[in-house]
Amino acid sequence: MAIRVAHVGTGNVGRLALTGLLTNPAYELTSVCVSTPAKVGKDAGELAGLDISTGITATDDLGVLLETKPDCVVYCAMGDTRGPDAIADVMRLLAAGVDVVGSAPVVLQFPWKLMPRKYIDMVEDAAREGGSSLFITGVDPGFANDLIPFAFASTCQRIEQVRCMEIADYATYDGATVMFDVMGFGRPLDDLPILFQPGVLSIAWGTTIRQLAAGLGIEIDDITESYEREPAPEAFDIAAGHVPAGTVAAMRFEIRGMVGGRPAIVVEHVTRLRADLRPDWAQPAQPGGSYRVEIAGEPSYTVDICPSSDRGDHNHAAIVAAAGRIVNAIPAVVAAQPGIRTTLDLPFITGSGLFAAG
């Protein structure tokens, strides 16, 4: 019997997750909820970019969505700029007895020792009330810096450091809020965007640091962060808009989980809007972008993950991967015990039923 799934959010990740739901016979779509007024009333097939009519039209009311009695909700609404609202949405769904798997709010990927205990308890209480479970994932934070490092760490005799990297050109990433408001591209260098407000990096990727530490059986003493930015040598345009000369056009940042005064777990991002900017920073393993996991130990590893797609570039492929990780986890999340679930809790998800010749 197909799992009854409702869907929230049709942005970059959400639209592709919705495509995954509509094209997989393991799922029966019950409802779609959106926040953009122009999308209300549109058919789910149109919102997914598919040439089909489902008869399911978008609402902007979670209450209407719940009336369709889904077993699970795929939650891909914006969480970067509306964290408290996203947490409130998730708690409402959990308390109603609906399992949730999604891309936001990221802090709930692994909130322990990052969120105050009382707020974690509120989410867990909602899950216990509804007998429901929650799994937040994606690509980064997500499988590129939890599932992949754990797989290779499982072969080691000794581990001295784990470094997870995203090295990518974001010029084709079409998301103005994330690009300009959250990351601060196209803004003066003395402007401090959301991402570089003190402590934000440590919260956003602290889930990754803490989850890796838990899986490796180590205690993190402290999480530190640093960043540097590079201005545009001249004005140019990207998919999300205009980048004036002298404004931010490349950035590099690190979040470090410290043990005994040394970095044991490191997340590093190198993000450019043009390939010629800061050639001294790390370069991707394929044109455009890649992910990299480095393990220093015995044995040591360098693992390059190079997403590609026949429907877009590296950025599109990475978003497809994030959406796929979410949608393919639904059966495991529905079967899981109530509460906040993580990669450490869920069984290995293999992509069963996805094979297609061609």
Image (cartoon, helix red, strand yellow):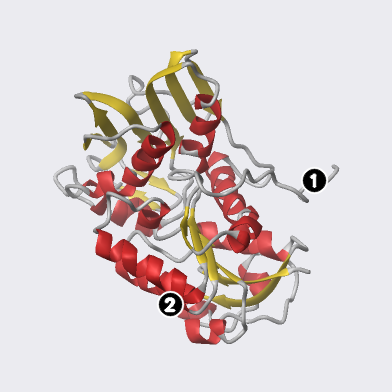
Residue farthest to the top, as pictured? 298
Q: Is residue 161 above or below residue 210?
A: above
Tell whether 305 sits left or right of 114: right
Image quarter in which the C terminus is found: top right
Give the residue type at disc 2: Arg
Quadrant of the rendered structure where residue 95 is?
bottom left
Mark toward the start of the polypeptide (2 vs 1): 2
Task: Give coordinates of residue 26: x percent, y percent.
Answer: 75, 62
Tell me the residue at 33%/19% (across/down).
280
Task: Give coordinates of residue 163: x percent, y percent.
Answer: 39, 27
Say what secondary structure mark 2 lies in.
Answer: helix
Say what secondary structure mark 1 lies in.
Answer: loop
Tell whether 312 sits left or right of 90: right
Instruction: Please identify, in this view, whether the residue under mark 2 or under mark 1 is nearer the observer.
Output: 2
Image quarter in which the N terminus is found: bottom right
Query: Which residue is identified by label 2?
Result: 92
Quadrant of the rendered structure where residue 99 is?
bottom right
- Asked whether residue 83 is in view, the answer is no
Give the residue type at disc 1: Phe
Q: Nearer the viewer, residue 52 or 265?
A: 265
- Asked whether residue 250 is in view, the answer is yes
Query: Which residue is identified by label 1?
Result: 355
Q: Is residue 228 above or below residue 30?
A: above
Q: Nearer the viewer, residue 108 or 13?
A: 108
Tell me the residue at 18%/42% (across/down).
189
Residues packed near mark 1 inside 10 Å, few (<14), some (14 to 19) or many (20 plus)? few
Task: Give coordinates of residue 288: x percent, y percent.
Answer: 51, 33
- The dot on residue 116 is none
Task: Give coordinates of residue 19: x percent, y percent.
Answer: 66, 61
Distance from disc 2 to disc 1, alpha carbons, whole Å, reads 35 Å
